[in-house]
Amino acid sequence: ATEERLLLCLDRATGRLLWKQPVLKSPFESLHRLNSHASSTPATDGQRVYVSFLDQTQMYVAAFDFDGKRLWEARPGVFSSKHGFCSSPVLWKDKVIINGDHDGEAYLVALDAATGKEKWKTPRPNKTRSYCVPLIRTIGERNEMILSGSKSVASYDPDTGIQQWLIDGPTEQYVASMVYNGTLLFLTCGFPEHHMMAIRPGGSGNVTASHIVWRTQKAASYVPSPVSIGPYFVVVSDGGVASCFVADSGERLWMERIPEGRGHSASLLTANGLVYFFSDDGLMSVVKPGPTFEVLAQSQLGEKVSASPAVYGDHLFLRGEAHLFCLGKASLP
């Protein structure tokens, strides 16, 4: 093995490799069996592409232009986890923000998108690993960056890193990212106990007693992120049991095992009013959310899939164990 981490650019219409740029050469970290050495998702603001990897004991972040030229690199903090690394960058205005929850002096950090220089860095109190990407939304008249992890759910001002509100727990470790339907926040987690919760955003200080709208534990997921779609909240457990809830009330409309599906790691996806499920063994299932469980289609990719899908127009892009797939019409615009 070359111990290289790479950034690849492909032609979207054909899948042809346009360029391949080494990002980092570093000894491989130890991993959980479901993790990889390139689990973080790049982000782009249309000007630059931002990537993150682990460089031994340091978080590594870099920016590239669309020709594969490295523009800057930064090591904003230490990072230690026996399960490996997966902190995807998120963008806010002129900032690249990274979750540094790990088994040590944990932190959230914002870097200048143009230079990589630190804009702010906020300590996280419980020094516990999580793998969640912060969710940034303007709610009311306030910008909120909401993150589940570090034995809590917390909101921060993405401009300053200052904490706005906090909910204790409901567990220790988190992988799945939160979703927001314009009214409520939804989470599914975690370790050592599984939970699902709906949270009303807003407020200040500790809002544990006032802002939890509903919660349940049965058939929650740890790894796959859920989705909110219309009036529904949909989740699949790691073992392949799917549930559809009335989002506002927490009423579970159904709980069914995905036919032929086994383990699930990839996040759910919504498109055209439907929910797409991807099992670890490569089965894609299309389900219509609603009062009854209805599987509209299933398709087998033929290889293992752990990465979450991406959508562009009428096409799905899937990273399998050995191939990158594009599903949709034969020709791309």
Image: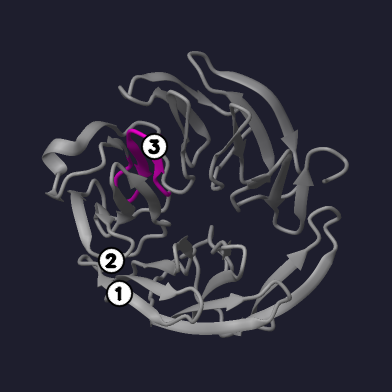
Q: Residues within 10 Å of mark 1 (few under 14, many from 20)?
A: some
Q: Which mark is residue 121?
A: 1
Residue of label 3: 220
**Left of 57 or right of it: where is 207?**
left
Q: Identify which residue is drawn at 50% across, 17% down.
A: 290
Using the rendered image of the protein, determine whether residue 192 is visible from the camera's viewpoint: no
Q: Nearer the viewer, residue 204 or 35?
A: 204
Q: Are marks 2 and 3 in contact (CB under 8 Å)?
A: no
Residue of label 2: 161
Residue 15 in magenta stretch: no
Q: Which mark is residue 306?
A: none
Q: Which residues are magenta?
A: 177-195
Which element is circle 3 on?
Answer: loop
Please determine whether, in this image, residue 323 is positioned above or below residue 5: above
Residue 244 picture location, percent across and down: 45, 25
Label 1, label 3: how far apart the Cα atoms are: 32 Å
Q: Which of the 4 image quadrants contains residue 210?
A: top left
The disc, 1 or 3, on the residue closer to the chain's N-terminal end is: 1
Q: Residues within 10 Å of mark 2 (few under 14, many from 20)?
A: some
The disc, 2 or 1, on the residue closer to the chain's N-terminal end is: 1
Residue type at mark 3 is: Ala
Q: Nearer the viewer, residue 93 or 251?
A: 93
